[in-house]
Image (cartoon, rainbow, N blue to C red):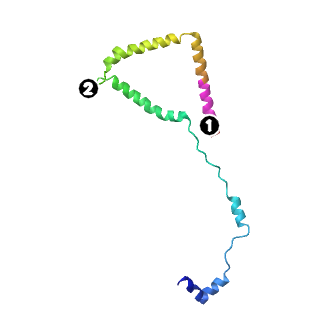
Amino acid sequence: MEKDEFFEDDYLRELIRRSPLDTPSEDFVDRVMANIQILPETQEVKQPFYFYVKSYVPYAIITLVLVLVISTSDFSLFNWMTGSGYMKNTLLPYIGTLTSILAKAFASRYVSWVILISFSAGILFLIDRFFSRRASL
């Protein structure tokens, strides 16, 4: 049956005439509109710098360890690198000289106090940041 043929059939025409149209209740629209919740606007939050640093630290450590292992080895594959002889004879004395210079620079009482206070303030700042971030979530 096609759409126009529905009204030619006596039974269907009588059934359509007797059945009322389905209409929603009078306060249907008001109730639906009252239950619609307004969503807060989402804003893009800029990630702090230390999130990026924190994600690259493991890769940097692995790279440094690999460079250290390769530079101190005498593999024939890496004959373009100087190997452990260079490390023992040249690099370690330079590192020793550098550490002795730094030790003399930090031997002053005033420098020691500044470093102590700075280190303590930094630790307190990091602890405060850690706990204030946890409380805001």
User: Element at badge 1?
Assistant: helix
For marks 1 and 2 on the same chain, the one whose residue lies earlier in the sequence: 2
Number of residues whose C-alpha sits closer than 10 Å to that of mark 2, classed few (under 14), some (14–19) or many (20 or more): few
Q: Is residue 60 above or below residue 101?
A: below
Name which quarter of the figure residue 13 lies in: bottom right
Residue 15, percent from left and from top: 63, 84
Q: Mostly what secondary structure, the magenta segment?
A: helix
Residue 49: numbered disc: none
Kind of residue indicated by mark 2: Ser
Q: Write down the residue under mark 2.
A: 76
Residue 46, percent from left and from top: 57, 39
Question: Quick one: 136 or 29, which is closer to the camera?
Answer: 29
Q: Which residues are magenta?
A: 122-132
Kind of residue indicated by mark 1: Arg
Instruction: For marks 1 and 2, give the one nearer the viewer.
Output: 2
Q: Is residue 32 magenta?
A: no
Residue 50, percent from left and from top: 54, 33
Image quarter where the C terminus lies is top right
Q: Residue at x 59, y 28 (%)?
A: 126
Name which quarter of the figure residue 29 lies in: bottom right
